[in-house]
Image: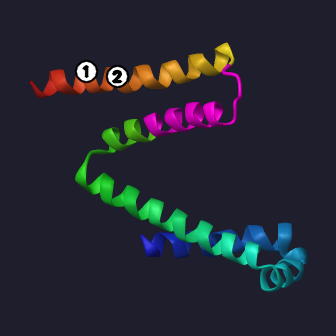
């Protein structure tokens, strides 16, 4: 997975230079002088790498469809959990989206059990 991360970084350089290249000096100064920025940037990169490494290991142990469904369920759980934590109202359209996601996970589980039997 390291190779994929490095290739992704190298492929983003041609996009980065024309878009943000002029502000790179400002960023490096901020990175060196503000410990919160440097810590958060490094922690974010490590967490993201760990998440992708775990996803790759999970994919090897399960199937692609199983991981896709689990990822969908995770997103629904995160959306509902954050809405509850922040005290946000769950509008009908949000509830419909969550219900579709949860229903899809439920249907996959039922169909998967039927096919195995």
State the residue at coordinates (66%, 21%): 90
- 10 Å crowding of disc 2: few (<14), some (14-19), many (20+): some
Above or below for 26 versus 76: below
State the residue at coordinates (50%, 19%): 99
Tell me, yes or no, whether the two marked residues, 1 and 2, touch with CB atoms within 8 Å.
Answer: yes
In the rendered view of the protein, which quadrant contains the C terminus?
Answer: top left
State the residue at coordinates (78%, 80%): 31
75 relative position to 17: left or right: left
Which residue is labeled 2 in the image?
106
Indicate the position of residue 58 as horizontal and vertical percent values: 31, 54
82 relative position to 58: left or right: right
In the rendered view of the protein, which quadrant contains the N terminus?
Answer: bottom left
Please, what secondary structure does the residue beneath circle 2 have?
helix
State the residue at coordinates (70%, 30%): 87
Please, what secondary structure does the residue beneath circle 1 have?
helix
Residue 62: say if magenta.
no
Which residue is labeled 1 in the image?
110
Q: Give the range drawn in magenta.
A: 72-90
Indicate the position of residue 7 as horizontal and vertical percent values: 54, 73
């Amino acid at each position: 997975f390291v190779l994929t991360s490095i290739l992704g970084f190298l492929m983003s350089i041609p996009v980065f230079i024309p878009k943000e290249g002029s502000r790179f000096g400002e960023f490096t100064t901020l990175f060196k002088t503000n410990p919160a920025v440097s810590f958060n940037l490094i922690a974010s990169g490590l967490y993201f790498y760990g998440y992708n490494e775990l996803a790759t290991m999970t994919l090897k142990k399960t199937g692609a469809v199983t991981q896709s469904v689990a990822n969908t369920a995770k997103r629904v759980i995160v959306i509902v959990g954050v809405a509850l934590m922040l005290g946000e109202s769950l509008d009908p359209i949000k509830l419909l989206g969550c219900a579709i996601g949860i229903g899809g996970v439920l249907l996959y589980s039922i169909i998967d059990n039927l096919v195995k039997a």
